Image (spheres, rainbow, N blue to C red):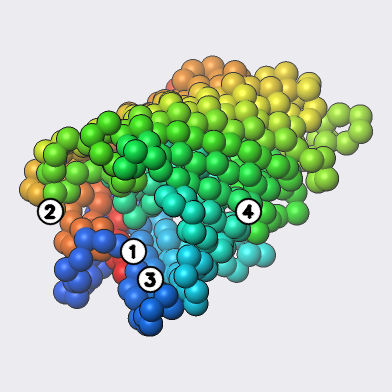
Amino acid sequence: MKISNGGYKKVFTGLGIVLVALFTLMTGVVNNADASGIVVYKDGDKYVKIGGRIQLQYHFKNMQTATTDPAGEDSIFFRRLRPFIEGSVTKNWKGKFQWDMGDAAGDNEIAIKDAFIGYSGPHNIKIEFGNAYFRFSQEDLTSSKKQQLVERTFVGDHNYGSPERNTGVHLTGSLLEKKVTYGLSVAIADIDPDSKKLDFDTPVNQNSDFNQGTMIGARVSFHPFGHLSMSQGDLGKGGLKAVVNVAGYGWQNDDDNNTRTNISGMDTSGGSKLDVDNVEGIEVSGAVRFKGVSVDAEYNSFRAETVDNRATGGIYKDGSTTLENFAVEGGYMILANRLEVVAAFQRQDADNYAKKWKRTSFGLNYFVSGHHVKGQVVYRMGENLDGVDGKDENEVFVQAQYVF
């Protein structure tokens, strides 16, 4: 696949803007690799912490089918503009809320992210009441500020079956000095109906056509060489660490808001929108870190059914689909705590796909101060987008990140 001359000019212009932004950020670096906020007040058990992340991104893509020439388009935007406040006034309890002004859409002028009450009284157990991460998908549970690629792969993308944040009760715990960790979530979760996606969304940022339902899920992780935190890459070129995870969930539509299906079947006015009746998901994943080498791999599979069992389109065939995602990504720290080269392969298949959708990525990460200040460049090649044979797309991502 080729990029036109105009496309190259757009790419270099976008690169220049984002790299200048990164250089500017480099002039005010904090020497702390833990990107988890700043405590601005503390008195015994009482504290207030503030923080945030700024991710300025340039994205270029050119799509090509068997019958068309490459058509390029680009944009520069704040991928995330996300402050948070966390605090406590009593032992074992805290509150946190986080919002995103870079992810606002439609009537939602801001997107609510974390918004929960946390309790940590029981030994090695934490409970979050509110809007927090559902305990599914190793990649989705890894913060966006600690990803090796600019964008998550299929296995961690809420558009393709990973629940992300939902409103309910979320429990996490550990055993055997954190060699075994586990999680349990019971939540209210919405799905944005779309025949091409299996798109989970939180009910606190609800649109009028979202399917509403309840979901329960659990995960167990084994860390044979000591606890491995949810952070991609091995910045400090440390010793051997590894983790193996299994997880699963079930979601059921409560039939309160099926706006795309009428009593006689499909409502054609909805176009490509399809109400989802139920979803079951499973995950098997793992990761290894050793001397600057990192590898993350994940497979997840989702069985989904539409309210109208005759519906065919996008990922669905005759009212149902098995959506399968696989991804493996890895990196090597050429310079400890500074420069990392990364590569990834991901694949998606669904019952109504003519061909498997594949993506191959290559990139570089430069760390100015750990995950506080870093720059990322990724080139991603896509084949058979949305399962359509011969529909391909090349993309360039450039991102400057500042976290405090």
Tell me the CA gap for discs 2 and 4.
38 Å
Tell me the CA gap for discs 1 and 2.
20 Å
Residue 46, image x, y percentages: 43, 78
Residue 326, image x, y percentages: 41, 26
- Circle 1 sits on which residue? 36
- Circle 3 sits on which residue? 51
Q: Amino acid at mark 4?
A: Thr
Q: Amino acid at mark 1?
A: Ser
400 relative to 267 in the view: left or right: left
Q: Amino acid at mark 3?
A: Gly
Q: Earlier in the sequence, mark 1 or mark 4?
A: 1
- Circle 4 sits on which residue? 167
Q: Earlier in the sequence, mark 1 or mark 2?
A: 1
Mark 1 vs mark 2, foreground winner is 1
- Circle 2 sits on which residue? 338
**Mark number displayed over residue 191:** none
| In this view, 19 is above or below 309 | below
Residue at horizontal 48 percent and vertical 46 percent from the top: 172
Q: Earlier in the sequence, mark 3 or mark 1?
A: 1
The quadrant in which residue 116 appears is bottom right
Q: Secondary structure at mark 3?
A: strand
